[in-house]
Image: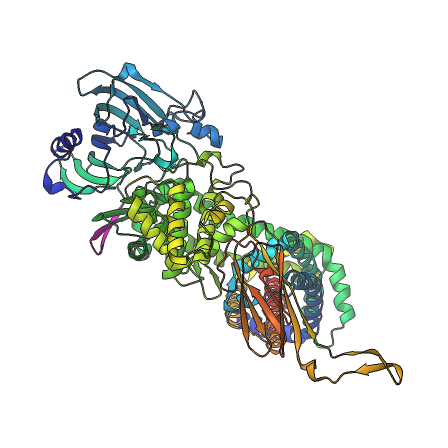
């Protein structure tokens, strides 16, 4: 009953007129909502104004406090957790620092809550960190209650743009307003008790939030061009030379915006999605490829994962001076990264666009906790990025597609992991800031993408697609955790493969997600022996010991042995392809558990070559070179490389000798 | 016309010094083989009996090299360190051989003896090193002034857009191309003077390098500019030919070898022609 009153309340007082609604049926629970009215001061580099926000207590408890992120306080001093972790500093001048201040805060009854506010440090107890604000409620919120705050705040943007900040007249405004943590109930993401999940701002960490409705009114000087994650409702210029823009966004987890005088605007359409692209004036040559990249990603993820529901999408290619805001995602707004004159065959700008758009699924809709399980957004998203890039830009060529030199996105992920010196330092379970020895990026992006590609290799593309479709269907606009993804994988694999991979896929996740071992299979060698006819001394009745030589009928047969070894700790099923001299081939399947296996054949033709994993289904294998063995190695290709290299040196040394 | 004469005489002199060029080719080729040979056997070891070399047939595949590197990372470190050594060794080596070459170009006759070649190489070696290092420093400093400094200034004034930087870089590169011949002329005139006069007087030679460059500036300058452009175009042609040719058989490899050495010999000839032209201008 309370819920019904509440919904009524939401639709009347908070969510305004029907014409502005994006989704007639909410996509998410919308436990939080924000209505903001702010102004950008382009001289003071501040955004200030007021906000009306609500949080709904959907637990069965009376909740005594509310916790909010005050992310910009990470830039308040060099002693914040953010700067302690990277040993840096926001800068030397006053203008360099960033901070956020609550000027006033009252609840619906008009009670001033400032006296109930304090900063807490749930992660590290660092007293200098002011990125999490706790507000004790004058009366606890009962189950089903909606808590309203009316807040006046000022946000000062930092000068060194780390996702958010300003440079000159360029502004990227992100993590900029007091924002609710997520109140998690017992059982959610494996939690034992109800409570707030509201982490401090760390160097190596992204975010976590409820899907919310945002109604944001922004005032900027007229000459600024603004982009945001919202749908444009209205835009007008007043007599004093200011632009007042109204945005509305629904069911997104964060609202960010940018303002710069220099943007060029482009528009495009993909099915129901109106795409708006803001780019610096000197990058006309990069516009078409960027738009194509985002349309490719839209098409692929719609087909393979689930629909992109929003009718609007804005993305921004920040100018060089705002480079620190590039490559970041806010669901219906994201930033790419490029530069003018990047040749067509270097696909890195396209890759960044595909990647950042991909986050609208992996953490935008499937709103995982990026603080605690970074592989679930970065790893899964890098996995899809690699599939999209290699699909649209050529298999084996998703990152560099040059006539003489190429690199696929899948390989880029793999190389990043298998050739990292610290590849075994941790598994994928730590929180973002707890990854040891600078392994956060490598393990949560590349290793996770690589073992997901390996999972695909083992169970097949169709099956993994089904896993993601189910994952989307059951968890979009909710907050899934690793256990939920594993549970779906177990269910779908069982349905599609029966008992082929055992009772569940835990053996796989235990070795990859929760394992640190490396995978390396080696083709140790091939032996071919002619099967011999008998030749030896036999005792006869008549002549005593005599030498007997049987005829050579069986000599045409070969006994051939292929020797396979497992050098790494990780045990995965592998295929082995054996080539005989007469052109015939035999394919073997090994569960990969022992330390070695031999395959023996008796055939009229000998073995000339054998390969483990001939279709490169196991990218976790740290060394492909030892995966194959041939009795007649082809030396031409690498001789050719050495010859060309030597010629290059010959010319180069001569040229520089004046 | 001095300018035309420089070309024709340069070509004739280079042609008459074929013997010297052959000596240079033979020696540098053997030097290079000394470095390339261990690389080859290391590669053979690293690859063992793998069949994944076929990955190379579709162009340069980074995965493949990273996986080799994993198995032989000390070798990779050795190669990258080794390249520096190769560069330094060859720098001295060519400086040495240039002595004989300049002498041969000045002599300008078929009958030039290999023994003379080596004697001159040894004699001029130290002086040539000094000339070369000083001219190299001049080139680096001027390139910094012409390219580096404007770019730094451009960066500092944050108003400059990316496109402006590219346009600026384009212009600066053209400017650099037009400046480079002056330094090459100084280096070449100095060396010619030194070979023709007193091989111990390095600074006098350098002084003449400047004088020679600026006395008949236009014919010298345009001659050198055209030679620089010709060599640049030739380098592009070589890249085009070699990147387009990827033989997949031993016979093809042998042809590749012959082709690369013929192309390199032409490169040596063009360089000798440049020196020869300056020698001719000096002797006119
Ligand atoms: Zn990402």
Closest to the observer, B278 or B15: B15
Q: Split into 4 quadrants, where in the image is the N terminus of chain A?
A: top left
Closest to the observer, A344 or A486: A486
Residue drawn at (19%, 39%) of the image: A248
Q: Which residues are magenta?
A: A262-276
Instruction: Indicate yes or no whether the magenta region holds residue A263.
Output: yes
Q: Main secondary structure of the magenta part?
A: strand
Residue drawn at (28%, 52%) of the image: A306
Query: A421 left or right of A340?
Result: right
Q: Position of residue B235 (x, y in %)?
A: 53, 67
Q: Residue furthest front?
A: A541
Instruction: Indicate yes or no whether the magenta region holds residue B108.
Output: no
Q: Is residue B53 at all visible to an observer of this figure?
A: yes
- The answer to which quarter of the image holds residue A72 is top left
Q: Position of residue A123 (x, y in %)?
A: 43, 27
Q: Split into 4 quadrants, where in the image is the C terminus of chain A?
A: bottom right
In this rendering, the answer to whether B266 lies above or below A568 is below
Closest to the observer, B257 or A152: A152
Q: Position of residue B192 (x, y in %)?
A: 66, 62
């Amino acid at each position: 009953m309370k819920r019904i009153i509440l919904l009524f309340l939401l639709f009347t007082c908070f969510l305004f007129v029907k014409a502005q609604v994006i989704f007639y049926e909410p996509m998410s629970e919308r436990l939080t909502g924000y209505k903001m009215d702010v102004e950008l001061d382009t001289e003071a580099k501040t955004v200030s104004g007021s906000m009306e926000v609500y949080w709904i207590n959907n637990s069965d408890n009376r909740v005594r406090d509310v916790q909010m992120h005050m992310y910009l306080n990470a830039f308040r001093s060099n002693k914040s957790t953010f700067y302690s972790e990277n040993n840096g500093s926001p800068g030397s001048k006053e203008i360099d620092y960033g901070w956020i201040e609550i000027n006033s805060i009252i609840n619906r009854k008009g009670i001033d809550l400032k006296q109930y506010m304090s900063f807490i440090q749930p992660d590290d107890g660092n007293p200098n960190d002011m990125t999490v604000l706790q507000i004790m409620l004058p009366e606890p919120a009962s189950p089903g209650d909606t808590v309203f705050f009316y807040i006046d705040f000022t946000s000062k943007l930092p000068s060194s743009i780390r996702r958010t900040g300003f440079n000159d007249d360029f502004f990227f405004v992100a993590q900029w307003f007091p924002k609710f943590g997520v109140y998690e109930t017992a059982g959610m993401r494996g939690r034992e008790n109800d409570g707030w999940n509201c982490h401090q701002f760390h160097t190596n960490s992204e975010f976590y939030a409820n899907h919310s409705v945002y109604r944001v009114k922004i005032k900027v000087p007229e000459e600024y061009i603004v982009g945001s994650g919202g749908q444009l409702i209205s835009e007008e210029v007043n007599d004093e030379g200011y632009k007042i823009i109204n945005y509305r966004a629904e069911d997104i987890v964060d609202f960010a915006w940018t303002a710069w005088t220099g943007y060029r605007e482009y528009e495009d359409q993909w099915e129901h999605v109106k795409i708006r692209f803001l780019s610096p004036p000197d990058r006309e040559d990069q516009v078409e490829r960027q738009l194509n990249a985002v349309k490719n990603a839209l098409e692929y993820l719609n087909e393979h994962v689930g629909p992109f529901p929003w009718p609007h999408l804005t993305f921004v290619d920040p100018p060089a001076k705002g480079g620190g805001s590039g490559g970041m995602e806010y669901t219906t707004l994201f930033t790419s990264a490029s530069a003018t004159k990047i040749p067509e065959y270097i696909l890195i700008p396209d890759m960044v666009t595909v990647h950042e758009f991909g986050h609208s699924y992996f953490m935008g809709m499937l709103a995982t906790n990026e603080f605690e399980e970074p592989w679930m957004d970065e790893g899964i998203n890098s996995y899809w990025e690699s599939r999209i890039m290699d699909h649209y830009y050529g298999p084996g060529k998703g990152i560099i597609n040059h006539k003489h030199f190429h690199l696929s996105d899948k390989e880029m992920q793999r190389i990043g992991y298998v050739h990292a010196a610290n590849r075994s330092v941790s598994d994928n379970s730590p929180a973002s800031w707890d990854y040891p020895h600078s392994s956060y990026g490598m393990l949560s992006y590349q290793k996770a993408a690589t073992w997901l590609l390996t999972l695909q290799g083992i169970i097949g593309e169709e099956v993994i697609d089904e896993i993601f479709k189910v994952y989307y269907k059951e968890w979009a606009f909710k907050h899934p955790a690793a256990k939920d993804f594993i549970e779906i994988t177990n269910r779908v694999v069982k349905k599609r493969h029966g008992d082929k991979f055992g009772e569940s896929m835990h053996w796989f996740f235990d070795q990859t997600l929760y394992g640190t071992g490396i995978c390396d299979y080696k083709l140790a060698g091939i032996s071919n022996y002619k099967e011999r006819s008998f030749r030896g001394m036999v005792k006869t009745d008549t002549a005593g010991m005599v030498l007997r030589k049987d005829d050579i009928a069986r000599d045409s047969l070969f006994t051939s042995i292929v020797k396979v070894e497992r050098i790494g700790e990780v045990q995965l099923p592998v295929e082995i392809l054996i080539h005989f001299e007469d052109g015939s081939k035999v394919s073997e399947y090994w569960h990969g558990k022992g330390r070695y296996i031999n395959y023996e054949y008796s055939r009229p033709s000998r073995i000339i070559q054998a390969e483990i994993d001939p279709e490169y289904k196991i990218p976790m294998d740290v060394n492909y070179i030892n995966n194959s063995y041939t009795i007649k190695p082809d030396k031409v290709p690498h001789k050719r490389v050495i010859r060309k290299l030597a010629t290059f040196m010959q010319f180069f040394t001569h040229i520089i000798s004046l | 016309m001095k300018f035309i004469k420089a070309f024709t005489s340069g070509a004739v002199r280079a042609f008459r010094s074929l013997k010297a060029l052959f000596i240079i080719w033979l020696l540098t080729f053997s030097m290079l083989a000394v470095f390339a040979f261990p690389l080859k056997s290391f590669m053979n070891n690293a690859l063992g009996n793998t069949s994944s070399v076929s990955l190379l047939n579709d162009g340069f595949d980074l995965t493949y090299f990273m996986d080799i590197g994993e198995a032989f990372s000390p070798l990779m470190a050795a190669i990258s360190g080794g390249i520096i050594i190769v560069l330094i060794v060859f720098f001295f080596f060519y400086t040495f051989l240039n002595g004989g070459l300049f002498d041969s170009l000045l002599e300008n006759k078929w009958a030039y003896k290999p023994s003379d070649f080596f004697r001159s190489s040894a004699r001029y070696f130290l002086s040539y090193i000094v000339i070369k290092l000083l001219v190299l420093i001049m080139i680096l400093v001027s390139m910094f002034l012409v390219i580096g400094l404007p770019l730094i200034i451009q960066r500092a004034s944050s108003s400059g857009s990316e496109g402006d930087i590219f346009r600026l870089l384009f212009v600066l590169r053209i400017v650099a191309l037009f400046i480079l011949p002056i330094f090459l002329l100084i280096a070449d005139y100095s060396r010619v003077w030194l070979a023709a006069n007193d091989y111990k007087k390095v600074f006098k030679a350098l002084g003449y390098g400047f004088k020679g460059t600026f006395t008949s500036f236009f014919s010298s300058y345009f001659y050198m500019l055209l030679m620089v452009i010709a060599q640049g175009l030739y380098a592009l042609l070589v890249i085009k030919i070699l990147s387009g040719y990827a033989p997949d058989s031993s016979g093809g490899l042998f042809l590749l070898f012959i082709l690369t050495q013929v192309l390199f010999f032409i490169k040596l000839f063009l360089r000798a022609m440049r020196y020869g032209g300056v020698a001719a201008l000096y002797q006119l």
